[in-house]
Image (spheres, rainbow, N blue to C red):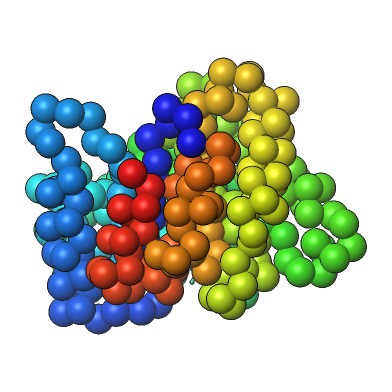
């Protein structure tokens, strides 16, 4: 890693209940606050993404700390007749500062297109939220050799409306679909190679300086046992963690591995 501050996200997906979510948040806050000296810059940024109904309760715990509260999804409009959807303004209202767009489960289970992911990214940024834009290829795409083409398209369309100014509020998460929740993580070499290509593609859309400063997380079966080797790669700036973020012990150990 270079001088980019690592960023570790805990994507709780559709897990936890009110009580266990609050306990989990409390244990993460205690751990992260103990790492951070008031006078120094934070050594790592930590974000948790609870399910929508628990955002406000979790934010009441993270709010006083350096841990950020994020949302797993949002809608493309700020208000209106969109039954079942959640507006970026509502997220901000309850203290959310960051949102995931393009998560693999939104793309492949719900069927979100690159264009919709781009609209959500645009709306989130315009409404004042930071964004973690997730990209990644399926096993079929990897096998047929189209990994980079797929990811470059996801980046180009996902960042379509993003400017040299708003890109500063964006983190990229590279999450190969075949590695998510399967226990099969990408090897550090494979992950590093895709991360370097993502950085090069960002340079081609924006500038080399922007590509140097943007943070690119790896996601897909990250655990305390494999985190250190992944974080040792020069273009890997942290992790987006699913399963292992549901236990404070394993999530905090992954945070520790990034330091
Ligand atoms: P996983 O999920 O760590 O359980 O593989 C990662 C993610 O989906 O963000």
**Res 85 seen here:** no
- Mark count: 0
- In the picture provided, is 241 more to the left or to the right than 142? left
Residue found 57% across the figure and 70% down from its top: 180
> As drawn, which residue projects farthest toward the right?
144
- In the picture provided, is 105 more to the left or to the right than 3? right
* Residue 112 in which image quadrant: bottom right
Q: In this view, does 60 lie above or below 149?
A: below
- Of residues 8 and 64, the one nearer the viewer is 8
* Residue 242 in which image quadrant: bottom left
- In the picture provided, is 65 more to the left or to the right than 219? left
Find residue 194 and report its horizontal and vertical position in percent.
69, 46
Find residue 252 and report its horizontal and vertical position in percent.
28, 61
Residue found 80% across the figure and 62% down from its top: 142
- Of residues 186 and 175, the one nearer the viewer is 186
Residue found 67% across the figure and 70% down from its top: 178
Q: Is residue 123 above or below residue 199?
A: below
- In the picture provided, is 191 more to the left or to the right than 24? right
Residue found 47% across the figure and 30% down from its top: 2
Find residue 50 and report its horizontal and vertical position in percent.
31, 66
Q: Is residue 175 above or below residue 133?
A: below
Q: Is residue 174 above or below residue 183?
A: above
Find residue 202 and report its horizontal and vertical position in percent.
65, 31
**Res 233 seen here:** yes
- Of residues 126 and 73, the one nearer the viewer is 73
Q: In which quarter of the image is the C terminus?
A: top left
């Amino acid at each position: 890693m270079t001088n980019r501050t690592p960023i570790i996200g805990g994507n709780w997906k559709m897990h936890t209940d009110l009580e266990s979510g609050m306990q989990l948040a409390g244990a993460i806050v205690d751990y992260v606050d103990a790492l951070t000296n008031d006078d120094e810059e934070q050594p790592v940024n930590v974000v948790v993404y609870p399910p929508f109904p628990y955002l406000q309760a979790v934010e009441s715990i993270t709010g006083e700390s350096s841990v950020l509260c994020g949302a797993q999804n949002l809608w493309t409009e700020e208000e209106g007749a969109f039954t079942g959807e959640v507006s970026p303004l509502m997220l901000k209202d309850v203290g959310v500062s960051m949102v995931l767009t393009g998560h693999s489960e939104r793309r492949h289970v719900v069927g979100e297109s690159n264009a919709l992911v781009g609209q959500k990214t645009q709306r989130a940024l315009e409404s004042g939220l930071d964004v973690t834009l997730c990209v990644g290829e399926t096993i079929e795409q990897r096998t047929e050799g189209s990994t980079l083409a797929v990811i470059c398209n996801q980046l180009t369309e996902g960042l379509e409306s993003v400017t040299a100014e708003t890109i500063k509020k964006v983190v990229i998460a590279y999450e190969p679909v075949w590695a998510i929740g399967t226990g099969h993580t990408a090897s550090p070499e494979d992950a590093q190679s895709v991360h370097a290509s993502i950085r090069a593609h960002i340079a081609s859309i924006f500038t080399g300086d922007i590509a140097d400063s943007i943070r690119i997380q790896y996601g897909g079966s990250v655990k305390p046992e494999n985190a250190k080797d992944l974080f040792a790669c020069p273009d890997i700036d942290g992790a987006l963690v699913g399963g292992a973020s549901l236990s404070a012990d394993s999530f905090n150990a992954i945070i520790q591995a990034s330091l």
